[in-house]
Amino acid sequence: MTLEFSVLLRLFDERSVAFRAAVASAPSLDVRVPTCPEWTLFDLVQHLGGVHRFWAATVATGLADAPPGRDRAGGRPAVPREREALLAWSAESTKQLLSALREAGPDRGRWTWWGPSESPQTSGAVARHPLQEIAVHTYDAQITLGALQPLPEEAALDGVEEFLSTCCAWTTAWPHKPAAVDFHATEGRSWRLSLSADGARTTRLPTPGARRSRRRRGDE
C-alpha cells in the first residue's frame, strides 16, 4: 500500500520547500552537485522545475496515449538566472503540479512513462513518483552544501517500494532461472522482488515482529 494521496502531496510540498531552502543558502548557483557531477545547482533547479511543469500538464491533459506536447507542457521557457527569480519560478512549478493533482484526485487515469506494472497509470501514482524525485534531489542540493538533513522516514520507505514497483517491475518474462532478491530497511520494513517467467513482481514481507506473532499463534 502506498501512502495516502494527501500525505503524498504534503510530503511533496515539504520536500520542495526544503529543496528551495538549500538552493537559497548556497554560495553560488554555479557550484557543482557532487551526486550529479555534470550539473550545477542551477541545472538541478531547472531540471526539477521542468519535471514539475511536465507532470502538471500530463495530469491536466487526462488519459492519453502519449505525453503532452511542449506547447501544453509550457515548452522550454527561459528559466531566470537570478536567484530570487529562479526560486520564484521553482515555487510556481511546484504550485502548478500540486494544483493539477488536487483537482484530479488520486484515481483518474493518466499517461505515465511506465507501462503495465504494479504501479497504476493514475494521477495518484503520478503524485508518488515526483515526490521521490524531489526527495532525492533535495538530498543532492543539501549534500552540495554539506548540510544534510534527515529524509522523512515515511518518504524514504515509500521511495524504496515505489522504485521496486515502478522501475523494477515488468510483465515480460525473466529469461533466466527464477530468482528472488530481498531488500531490508533498517527501519524494519522488507520487500521481495521475484523474477520469473511471469516477469518481476514486488511483495512486502512481514516484519520480524509480525512473523514472531504468527509463530506464537501457530504453537498454541
Image (cartoon, rainbow, N blue to C red):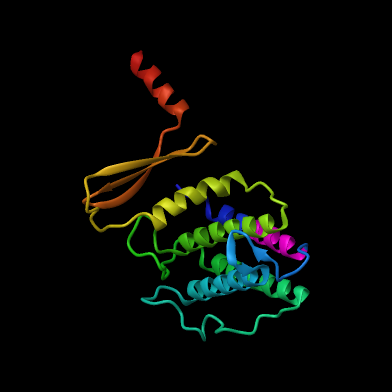
On-image quarter of the C terminus: top left
Q: Residue at x 65, y 61 (%)?
A: 16
**Residue positioned most to the top:** 220
Question: Which image quarter: residue 95?
Answer: bottom right
Question: Which image quarter: residue 40?
Answer: bottom right
In this picture, residue 195 sits left or right of residue 95: left
Q: Position of residue 137 (x, y in %)?
A: 60, 60
Q: Position of residue 190 (x, y in %)?
A: 44, 38
Residue 10 visible in the shown view: no
In this picture, residue 151 sits left or right of residue 215: right
In depth, the one of 212 and 23 nearer the eye is: 23
Q: In this picture, is 58 found above or below 204?
A: below
Residue numbers of the magenta segment: 13-24
Question: Which image quarter: residue 217?
Answer: top left
Dominant secondary-structure state across the stretch colored magenta:
helix
Q: Position of residue 150 (x, y in %)?
A: 66, 46
Q: Residue at x 72, y 79 (%)?
A: 81
Q: Position of residue 32 (x, y in %)?
A: 66, 66
Q: In this picture, is 158 found above or below 83?
A: above
